[in-house]
């Protein structure tokens, strides 16, 4: 069973459409989204509308949370020139959970944005090494899911910590130089995780290692 994995779309409708085309080409069976569907790009409403139409399971990212607060402040203070999001977009963002757990092809998967306990939390240690942060290790200890899917970093990776595996498809969007402009496909039950560059629709190298 092939699972298409998206994250950090950030209102970039063109990149989302490229991702969905790639998923169709590879005949994925379902799609998951690890959050940050809005902010930064120009097509927040359209991105949300498409995700809703397709019924893509999605978690709330830190920018999704920020957008809700920003819209509330804009309405309260009537910011000049501010273009509000549609009410159905705001309601969708509010409805998104922080964590989704699914059993797919006999594999327990946890989907979140930053970390399960913090919407913008760190997976890796703040010193920049390939060590996990203490708080994320605690998150892993609290779940019986075998695979944890995250986003937030805009950089794809596939790392293993003891019996757990943590994967990140990178950022779908192509808005800034640091955006990876990638998506992932997870093949279950075998576990093959492949990350694709959306510019070329070809597999790319990512960080793969055991971590401490």
Image (cartoon, grey):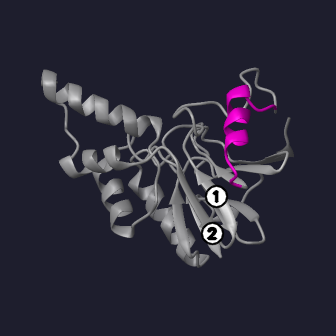
Query: In the rendered view of the protein, which quadrant contains the N terminus?
Result: bottom right
Per the image, the residue denoted by label 1 is 109
Per the image, the residue denoted by label 2 is 104
Estimate the x, y position of residue 155 in percent, counting from the top left. 66, 42
Residue 80 appears in the figure: no
Left or right of 126? Residue 39 is left
Name the dominant secondary structure of the magenta segment.
helix
Estimate the x, y position of residue 54 in percent, counting from the top left. 39, 69
Residue shown at 14% from the left, 24% from the top: 76
Q: Is residue 169 above or below residue 154?
A: below
Quarter occupied by residue 75: top left
Mark before the other along the chain sequence, 1 or 2: 2
Left or right of 197? Residue 134 is right
Distance of label 1 from label 2 (alpha carbons): 7 Å
Quarter occupied by residue 42: top left
Residue 100 appears in the figure: yes
Estimate the x, y position of residue 35 in percent, counting from the top left. 48, 47
Q: Which mark is residue 74?
A: none
Question: Is 109 colored magenta in this rendering?
Answer: no
Question: Do the CB atoms of the residues marked 1 and 2 lie less than 8 Å apart?
Answer: yes
> How dense is the environment of label 2, judged by Cα within 10 Å: few (below 14), some, or many (20 and up)?
few
For the residue labelled by badge 1, is the local secondary structure a helix, a strand or a loop? strand
């Amino acid at each position: 069973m092939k699972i298409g994995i998206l994250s950090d779309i950030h209102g970039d409708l063109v990149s989302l459409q490229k991702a969905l085309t790639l998923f169709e080409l590879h005949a994925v069976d379902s799609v998951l989204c690890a959050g940050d569907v809005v902010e930064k790009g120009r097509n927040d409403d359209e991105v949300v509308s498409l995700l809703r139409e397709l019924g893509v399971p999605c978690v709330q990212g830190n920018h999704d949370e920020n957008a809700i607060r920003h819209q509330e402040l804009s309405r309260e203070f009537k910011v000049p020139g501010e273009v509000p999001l549609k009410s159905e977009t705001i309601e969708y963002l509010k409805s998104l959970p922080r964590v989704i757990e699914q059993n797919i092809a006999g594999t327990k998967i946890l989907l979140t944005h930053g970390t399960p306990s913090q919407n913008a939390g760190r997976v890796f240690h703040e010193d920049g090494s390939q060590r996990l942060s203490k708080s994320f290790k605690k998150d892993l200890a609290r779940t019986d899911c075998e695979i944890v899917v995250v986003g937030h970093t805009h950089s794809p990776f596939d790392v293993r910590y003891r019996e757990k595996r943590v994967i990140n498809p990178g950022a779908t969007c192509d808005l800034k130089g640091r955006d990876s402009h990638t998506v992932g496909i997870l093949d279950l039950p075998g576990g093959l995780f492949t990350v694709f560059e959306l510019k070329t629709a070809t597999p790319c190298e990512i960080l793969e290692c055991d971590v401490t």
